[in-house]
Structure formats: structure tokens, C-alpha cells
Amino acid sequence: MHREVTTTVRVKLHSLTERKARLIEREYTAFQDAVHGDEANLYSATKQQAGKVRSNKNPREDTEQPVVLRNDCITIEHDEDTVLSSWWFKLPIYNPDRDRGDSIWVPVHVPEKDTHLLTDEYIRDSELVYRDGEWYVHLVCKRSVAIADEYDDVLAVDMGAKWIAVSAFLSDRDTQFHGAEVRRVREHYKQLRKSIGKAKVRSGAQVIERLGNKESQTVEHELHQVANELIARARERNAVIVFGDMTGLRFDNDEGRYVNDKTHKMPYAKMANILTYKSHLDGRECIPVSEYDTSVTCWRCGSQNTSREVQGRVECHECGLDDNGDKNGATNIGKRAVGKDIQSPLSTVGAVVAQPETQVVLEGTNGEMEPANSPEDVGLTLCEGSPRL
Ligand SMILES: [Zn+2]
């Protein structure tokens, strides 16, 4: 079996001549005009993309949108013989001097670890981004990776608020708790924000903004650590990874919120996407299963006549189970993945469970979409909004 894996490679433009810098800046500015509905001269394919951004996203006037570069208009090439740069990128632009679409070759830095991804067949629609006075192209590379078809166990992952993840093997219910740190990080920054908030208003706001960045980077780092732990654990037993999908939960109109409020306490969609991405790169299947009711169901007898009055425990009034609540939830997720019959051969799990879309991109509760690899992989700071359309 194969899965498509998407990696965003960030290449940095450098040593731009004055003419090229001017053309790029002109194209970028014209793109901003176009996405906000103004008439603008752009490379024709880019103009189409601006129209799409406008109709799909209707961006606010005070936001800047990356220029979407259609994949058939861009090329990246390695050229050892050039002194200035060993990598060059062909960027489509509108040339006002000739009054038509044109393209320019610009020198770029490519992270060494990503050079193997930069072949034409992998490259998809990408983005020209301006950040902190520098130009970047976020090259979206999509390739197919081989995924194992047979597994000896199931590693079920329950993502939560207290722990980033609780994982349990289905065969013997061996359980591990991952990443409590996130809660500490969040608490720490919450306190800091409170104390800073009382200080002078203007400088306080700036400090809080910086804290926000620092916090999200720390949390992001933690999510990667947890994903790595989970994959290493699955590898030990040749296990398929399944995780509880909270995005399917219904919105409760009476409550005015999602029934399960865990989603608000951690970047669930981001975690799911990082885990899926890394798992596929490891040649391992990673499947979301509905998490609905898994926390209130007794894993042993299937009854929902349970109570969770004691912190962190679940008690079953039918069979007398008294278990750790997270462990119970994870086990139910694993059982759901293999179907009702827990005796069924685990190697069939891929066939039993409905296959998700090749590249899992789950929508978070705020409607945010995340690319499967995180911005950390390309050395980016997190920003709001949808990075891809
Ligand atoms: Zn029971």
C-alpha cells in the first residue's frame, strides 16, 4: 500500500539584483490588490490563483496573502557550476516593461535535508512568502511512500487535555502517558500574561505577543516529541497506529460548544496531522477512528452504564470494572479500529477500518487547517490562517 506524503520545503531567496527584487515586490503587491478585489497586472496563472484565494477565503483587508504559484509555472534546479548559488528557482512574474507574463531565475538556499524532495514530479502549487524582510518560497512536495500492509498489534492513541496523548497496545493494554508538559507550558504563560497585563498597556501588549510566539513554538516542539515517542513505541511491536478523531464530534447547541471540550485545550488537529505525517514517513499506517462515546463506554463489557465520579477513573456498574479513564478510552479506540470482534486477526485492521483520504488534513475546531508537516520542519513561526488552498 502507498500513501501520499506532503512536505513543505522552505527555500530562501538571496542575492537578488535590484531589478529582480523590484519585480518580485511588484508581483507581491499586485497579488494583494487582486485578492482584495482590485484590478492588477499579474502573471496570468497567478492571477487565476488570486481569484481563487479571493473567492475561497475572502481575506481581510489588513492581512497579507502569500502569492500562490501554480506548479506548472515553477521550476527549481541544481547548478553546481554557478558561483553565486547552487540552487535556482524560476519564478513567474508579470513584466511591466514588456507588458506580459515573464519569469526570472532567482538564487535560493535549500535546506540540505530537503534536497532529495526537489524534483519536478513531486512539486505542487507553492507559495511566495514575505516575512521579516526576506523572501521565501514554500515549495509543496508530495510523494508516495510505501506503507506496511500487515501488523502484529494496534497502538491506540487517545489525545486529551491532561496528557497530549495516552497510548495503549490492544494486545495487553500496556499503557503510556505522553507530554504532560504542554499543560505546564500553558499554565506558565497564562500566569506570565496575567502579571504582564497589569503592567503598562503598550509595552505589555508587545511582550504578550512575543510570549504567544514562544509559547506556540514550545507547544509545537512538544507535539513533535510526543509523535516521535508514539512512533518509536509502535515500531517496537510492529503496530498500526489508530487515534481518536474528535473532529467528528457534534456541536451541542444547548451547550453552545462541542460536547467534548478537550479540543479547546490542545491543538488537536495539529497533533493528529503531525502524527499521521511522521507515521507515514515511517512506513506505518495511521488511522483516525471516531472517538464518540469511547470515554463513557466500558472497554471490557461494552456497557455505557458507567460513572467517572472519581478523578481520572471510570467505573462500570455492569461488570465492576474500575480503571484509569484514559486507559479505558484508548482501549476503546483500539477496539473500534479492529471492529467489534477483538479476536479478528490484527493484520486485517487496514481492511476493516475505512481508509481515510491519503493525506489526512483534519479541520480543527477553529476551522484551521494544518499541513501535515508542521512549520517547525521548515523553520517557520506559526501564523494564523490557512496556509494552503
Ligand atoms: Zn463493564
Image (cartoon, rainbow, N blue to C red):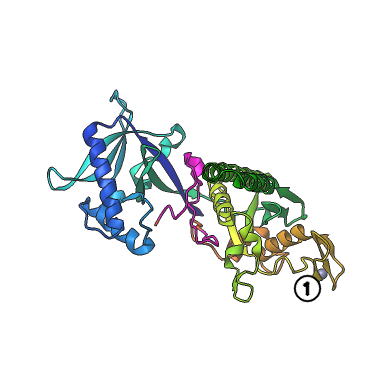
The picture quadrant for ligand 1 comes to bottom right
378 inside magenta stretch: yes
Residue at 28% from the left image edge and 35% from the top image edge: 106
Q: Quadrant of residue 119?
A: top left
* Foreground residue among 291 and 99: 99
Answer with left or right where residue 374 lies relative to residue 127: right
The furthest residue to the top: 83
Q: Which residue is mark 1?
A: 303
Q: Position of residue 8 (x, y in %)?
A: 44, 45
Answer with left or right where residue 364 lies relative to residue 320: left
Dot 1: within a 10 Å radius of its alpha carbon, few (fewer than 14), some, or many (20 or more) residues? Answer: some
Q: What count of labels does the image hold?
A: 1
* Foreground residue among 169 and 203: 203
Report if residue 108 is visible in the image: yes
* Foreground residue among 79 and 220: 220
Query: What amino acid is found at the position of numbered circle 1 in the picture?
Result: Ser
Q: Position of residue 302 (x, y in %)?
A: 76, 71
Whether disc 1's CB lies below 8 Å from ligand 1 is answered: yes
State the extent of the magenta-drawn residues as a range.
362-388
Residue at 32% from the left image edge and 26% from the top image edge: 80
Q: Quadrant of residue 77?
A: top left
The furthest residue to the bottom: 254
Residue at 81% from the left image edge and 60% from the top image edge: 311
Residue at 24% from the left image edge and 36% from the top image edge: 20
260 shown above or below 10: below
Q: Position of residue 96 (x, y in %)?
A: 15, 45
Report if residue 235 is visible in the image: no
Answer with left or right where residue 243 lies relative to residue 4: right
Task: Specify the quadrant that holds the C terminus.
Answer: bottom left
